[in-house]
Amino acid sequence: MASQASVTHGVMEGGGSYNVHARVPAGGANLALPLLEQTVRGMTFEGGTEPVVIADYGSSQGKNSLAPMRVAIKELRARVGPERPILVVHIDQAANDFNTLFDVLHKDPERYCRNDPHIYPSAIGRSFYENVFPGDHVHLGWSSYAAVWLSRIPMSIPDHFIAVASTGEVRAAFERQAAEDWMFFLSLRAGELRPGGRLVVVLPGNDDAGGVGFEPLFSHANEALAEMVRDGTITSEERSRMTLGAYPRRRCELLAPFTDGQFRGLRVEHCDLSVVTDAAWVDYEHDGNKEVLVNRHVGFFRAIFVPSLASALPEGKKPAFAEGLEKRLRQRLSERLTPLHSFVQTLVLAKQDATTRHRETR
């Protein structure tokens, strides 16, 4: 199992770009909000004035965290009263755009701490592949579209940049890394959750046929990268280092650690695969605005994936690379319009309390 892994992918594009263009992750997370509400409603909380701790594992720039935190806090207030302190801790890599996150928490009209003086937001600049909290510290964990990123890239992908397009030995290496990282992520969270705590995980997923929905977008981007090598914008050696450390898992891969019904004291209360409709395509079907559709698809790719691809380049080449790749991708998407309907996996994991463990060992 991994230990103190070094994250090798880039963070999301800064300056608030992720907040603007991350509609797909927001859509997937929104599908999980009723389940989050139900989860908090079913939790047991001890009395007293000790703060309730919510951990947001993989917050990025904060905008997509507002809705789930509002839902959780609303239910918590019904359970623990209006004055009990609630600590909301956002976790992401140290290189994350925390300035934008704090600006969102301070100014956004939909911020969850508005009109509630007993909510205390904070942030930790650390990967969730490390210990983030002391043991038995977190009441409720939330992680949306974050654990798809691996702790390390096991090997390069010949002629492509994403594991879902790989086969053979390369695909097997990513599968092993993804399995190892998933168990490590679960082990860390199991230690940080309080007995009786819950962890809600939302992840991009694969359907039964192995598709993720973004294959056309990835194919167009791969063609654009090949063109950039041919015209000398980037070298073939630089291109060979461009690999995304992301791996959407299948349901069977997510459930694999729970072979005897539990893993490190965690039990699966819910695991479901849903379709995330491409809202940009739905709007295009309604208004026929091709330019807006392409802009939204290109913005999504640039904000989420381009920083990781650009990490293979010297610092001075990154801005021109991002602009050049966007231009080429925009042209290809304009010529071949296609929807990007995708899939999302949602899990609820419960940490057993002492009473449950005692009953099951009798």
Image (tube, rainbow, N blue to C red):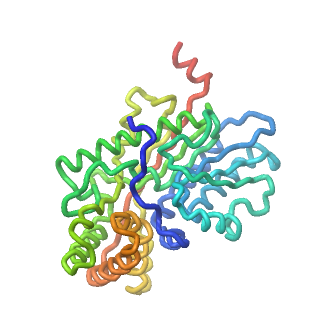
Residue drawn at x 41%, y 81% is 295
Residue drawn at x 48%, y 35% is 187
**Which x, y percent locates residue 43?**
64, 38
Q: Is residue 281 visible?
A: no
**Which x, y percent locates residue 141?**
58, 45
Please state which of residues 3 and 72 is positioned toward the viewer in this rendering: 3
Q: Is residue 65 visible?
A: yes
Relative vertical location of residue 90 with respect to residue 228 in this rendering, above or below: above
Residue 124 appears left or right of 166: right
Q: For residue 294, which quarter of the picture?
A: bottom left
Tally of marks: 0
Residue 76 appears left or right of 301: right
In the rendered image, the residue lying farthest to the top is: 362
**Which x, y percent locates residue 111?**
68, 64
Relative vertical location of residue 26 with respect to residue 231 in this rendering, above or below: above
Residue drawn at x 30%, y 84% is 331
Residue drawn at x 40%, y 55% is 204
Please state which of residues 215 and 153 is positioned toward the viewer in this rendering: 153
**In which quadrant is the N terminus drawn?**
top left
Q: For residue 339, which quarter of the picture?
A: bottom left
Relative vertical location of residue 247 with respect to residue 44 in this rendering, above or below: below
